[in-house]
Image (cartoon, rainbow, N blue to C red):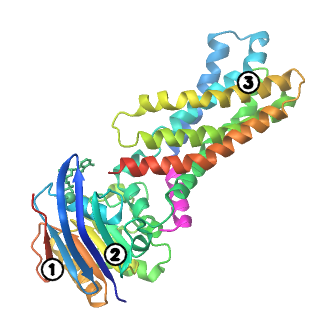
């Protein structure tokens, strides 16, 4: 498993405000990139621009050497994105939510993942009845269930308790060790991980 | 996520939210009941008007059903997941609308014989009315899906959506009621049915593409 994502000279504007200009960085297998910046600096926007649903004014993006600026499908097939609202359907149970996102996961793997995120007792609970942190854990369980080379995690630690933070850090570490790449935005200090930082300055 | 698991979760969501389906059905029944109660209960009025009454009620209840079809997906972040799933967004939209159509239209067809009878609609021609509904309502759903996608990010988009969509419903209603009236007076109605089918097919092809574009546009 090897992967290399190159962001070259990104220029992103939103509401006529420039969020970044001439921003370049790359992520390869085993690398953790942390996007840093104040609230509203454009961290989430940068991830959305990489994934291709916010337009960029200028810039080039390559995946494993191939120019994917105009068609991000190659990247989309190879990544998991978890945003501020991670797409958990409140009317479906924890199990059904995970089955929707990871239809090929086995029953054993599913239970294992639920255990990892401390939700094994909430298997059949409708997501509407979960706390914010628990909902985030449901979304995070997907990381245990699908093998994708690049993860884009937008503030994944919000609402997580200490135990959850540790579990997620460990999972990120194992993704890196198995040759994956992770892009993360967070304000939290990272205890066990040493990321390469991309700073967004106004 | 794949198309099958998406379809399954859409189905589960709609089945769990029985209330929405029941509301659309109740609305349909109430609108139809209003005519004999509020205008004129005589056969002379109701029989020729029955096609129009049924179709207006259908159009209104479909509008109700599709008005906020992506609202929740927008709020809980599902739309972002659709966009980044690598799956075809138009096809996801198509599947979603198809499930909605099924869940709304089947109960409606089940109560139709009773209501048609109440409107003195000749029972021999019930198949014509059912045909117009089967051929025409997909167009209403797919056109509605565009309006719903256009207004998905607006907090109070309902009225705007009505203004956008209702004019596009008119041709469908005209041809559908035209077919029913033709059948009632013993004329051929296959032309109108063919046009209804053509409108639905066009909507079925174009609407997922346009809805996908406007969803994508409203996400940024
Ligand atoms: N949906 C949106 N529509 C228009 N502008 C937005 C939207 N979301 C964020 N912005 C603007 O884009 C800028 C960057 O936002 P964002 O990327 O969410 O910041 P961060 O994630 O770093 O806190 C902000 O100035 C914000 O006002
Ligand atoms: Mg953000």
Location of mark 2 (residue) = A62
Residue B157: image location, x then y, percent: 39, 34
The answer to whether B30 appears left or right of A64 in the picture is right
Query: Going 54% across and 34% down the picture, which residue do you hit?
Result: B63
Looking at the rendered structure, whether the residues under marks 2 and 3 are on a common chain is answered as: no
The answer for how far apart the CA atoms under marks 2 and 3 are is: 59 Å
**Which residue occupies the foreground of this view, B172 or B102?**
B172
The chain under label 2 reads A
Q: Image quadrant of residue B156? A: top left
Q: Is residue A135 visible?
A: no
**What residue range appears in magenta?**
B1-17
The answer for how far apart the CA atoms under marks 1 and 2 are is: 21 Å
Q: How many marks?
A: 3
Name the disc covering residue B51, or none.
3
Q: In terms of secondary structure, where does tag 2 sit?
A: strand
Q: Residues within 10 Å of mark 2 (few under 14, many from 20)?
A: some
Mark 1 or mark 2: whose residue is earlier in sequence:
2
Name the disc covering residue A40, or none.
none
Q: In terms of secondary structure, where does tag 3 sit?
A: helix
Looking at the rendered structure, whether the residues under marks 3 and 1 are on a common chain is answered as: no
Location of mark 1 (residue) = A195
Q: In terms of secondary structure, where does tag 1 sit?
A: loop
Residue B193: image location, x then y, percent: 78, 36
Mark whose residue sits in front, 3 or 1: 1
Residue B94: image location, x then y, percent: 57, 53
């Amino acid at each position: 498993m090897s992967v290399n994502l190159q962001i070259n000279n990104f220029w992103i504007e939103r509401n006529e405000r420039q969020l970044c200009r001439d921003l370049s960085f790359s992520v390869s297998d085993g690398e953790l990139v942390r996007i840093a910046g104040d609230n509203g600096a454009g961290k989430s926007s940068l991830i959305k621009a990489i994934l291709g649903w916010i337009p960029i004014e200028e810039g080039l993006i390559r995946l494993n050497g191939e120019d994917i600026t105009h068609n991000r499908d190659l990247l989309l097939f190879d990544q998991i994105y978890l945003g501020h609202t991670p797409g958990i359907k409140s009317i479906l149970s924890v199990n059904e939510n995970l089955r929707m996102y990871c239809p090929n996961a086995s029953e054993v793997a599913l239970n294992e993942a639920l255990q990892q995120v401390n939700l094994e007792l909430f298997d059949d609970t409708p997501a509407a009845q979960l706390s914010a942190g628990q909902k985030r854990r449901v979304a995070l369980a997907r990381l245990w269930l699908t093998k994708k080379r690049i993860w884009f995690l937008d503030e994944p630690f919000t609402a997580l308790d200490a135990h959850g933070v540790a579990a997620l850090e460990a999972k990120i570490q194992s993704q890196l060790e198995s040759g994956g790449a992770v892009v993360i935005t967070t304000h939290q200090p990272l205890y066990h991980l040493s990321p390469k930082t991309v700073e967004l300055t106004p | 996520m794949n198309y099958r698991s998406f379809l399954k979760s859409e189905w589960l969501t709609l089945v769990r939210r029985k209330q929405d389906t029941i509301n659309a059905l109740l609305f349909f029944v109430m609108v139809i009941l209003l005519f004999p109660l509020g205008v004129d209960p005589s056969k002379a009025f109701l029989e020729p008007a029955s096609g129009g009454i049924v179709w207006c009620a259908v159009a209104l209840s479909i509008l109700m059903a599709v008005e906020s079809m992506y609202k929740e997906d927008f709020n809980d972040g599902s739309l972002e997941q659709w966009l980044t799933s690598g799956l075809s967004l138009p096809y996801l939209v198509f599947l979603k609308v198809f499930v909605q159509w099924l869940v709304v239209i089947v109960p409606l067809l089940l109560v139709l014989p009773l209501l048609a009878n109440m409107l003195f609609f000749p029972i021999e021609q019930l198949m014509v009315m059912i045909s117009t509904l089967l051929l025409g309502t997909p167009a209403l759903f797919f056109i509605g899906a565009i309006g719903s996608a256009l207004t998905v990010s607006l907090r109070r988009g309902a009225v705007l959506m009505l203004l956008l969509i209702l004019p596009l419903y008119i041709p469908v209603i005209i041809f559908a009621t035209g077919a029913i009236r033709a059948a009632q007076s013993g004329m051929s109605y296959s032309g109108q049915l063919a046009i209804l089918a053509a409108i639905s097919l066009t909507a079925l092809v174009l609407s997922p593409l346009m809805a996908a574009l406007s969803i994508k546009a409203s996400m940024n």
